[in-house]
Image (spheres, rainbow, N blue to C red):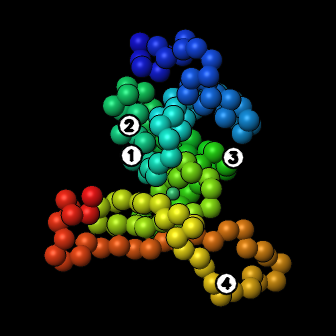
Amino acid sequence: MSDISSTRRARPGCPLSQVKDKLRQAGLRPTLQRVSLGWLLLGKGNRHVTAEMLFEGARKARVPVSLATVYNTLKQFTETGLVRQIAVDGRKSYFDTDLTDHHHFLIQEEGKVIDITCASMSVIGLPAAPAGYEVERVEVVVRLRRAPSQTSSELE
Ligand SMILES: [Zn+2]
């Protein structure tokens, strides 16, 4: 039996039952695959993941899903507002479980996305939306690269 099925019997109020509630509230049937991936994605606080990272997490937790299923599930989670897709990189999509408005640092070389809290930055001079459209939200990606003299321990 997998980790998922053994935790299914856990008491109400545990993250897994919260995941099921979140799925139902989003209008998604809590299938085993959705619950398993939702648990991996939403059960550990706010995070930024790619489909590949979630797939790797599923593999480690012995959740039997294909990468295509992970992509499809992330697409459904995005469409139903359970996660937010962050447009940071043409080659990779990052998904954010934090649905509040905030911006991101991207360290492309390391595949790392870090939150910038709204309090620490503001966007001014926003252009008017084209006719027939309105601004839904503004997401800023600040791209970082390693400063020449710094080592990773200095960044911590
Ligand atoms: Zn974020």
What residue lies at 43% left-to-right and 67% top-to-bottom? 105
Q: Which residue is mark 2?
A: 57
Q: Which residue is mark 3?
A: 80
Whether residue 139 is visible here, answered yes or no, is yes
Name the residue type under label 4: Leu
Q: Position of residue 80 (x, y in %)?
A: 69, 46
Label 2 with label 1: CB-CB less than 8 Å:
yes
Label 1 with label 3: CB-CB less than 8 Å:
no
Q: How far is the residue under mark 3 from the one under mark 2?
A: 22 Å
Label 4 with label 3: CB-CB less than 8 Å:
no
Q: Nearer the viewer, residue 45 or 156?
A: 156
What residue lies at 53% left-to-right and 38% top-to-bottom? 42
- Looking at the rendered structure, the secondary structure element under dot 2 is helix
Establish whether ligand 1 lies closer than 8 Å to the Cβ of label 1.
no
Q: Nearer the viewer, residue 123 or 65?
A: 123
Q: Position of residue 76 (x, y in %)?
A: 63, 45
Above or below, 99 relative to 16: below
Dot placed on the residue nearer the N-terminal end, 1 or 3: 1
Q: With 16 as the anchor, is 106 left or right in this view?
A: left
Location of the N terminus (image quadrant) = top left
Dot placed on the residue nearer the N-terminal end, 4 or 3: 3
What residue lies at 41% left-to-right and 60% top-to-bottom? 113
Q: Nearer the viewer, residue 67 or 40?
A: 40
Q: Which labelled disc corresponds to residue 126?
A: 4
Dot placed on the residue nearer the N-terminal end, 4 or 1: 1
Q: How far is the residue under mark 4 from the one under mark 2?
A: 39 Å
Q: Which residue is mark 1?
A: 53
Name the residue type under label 1: Met
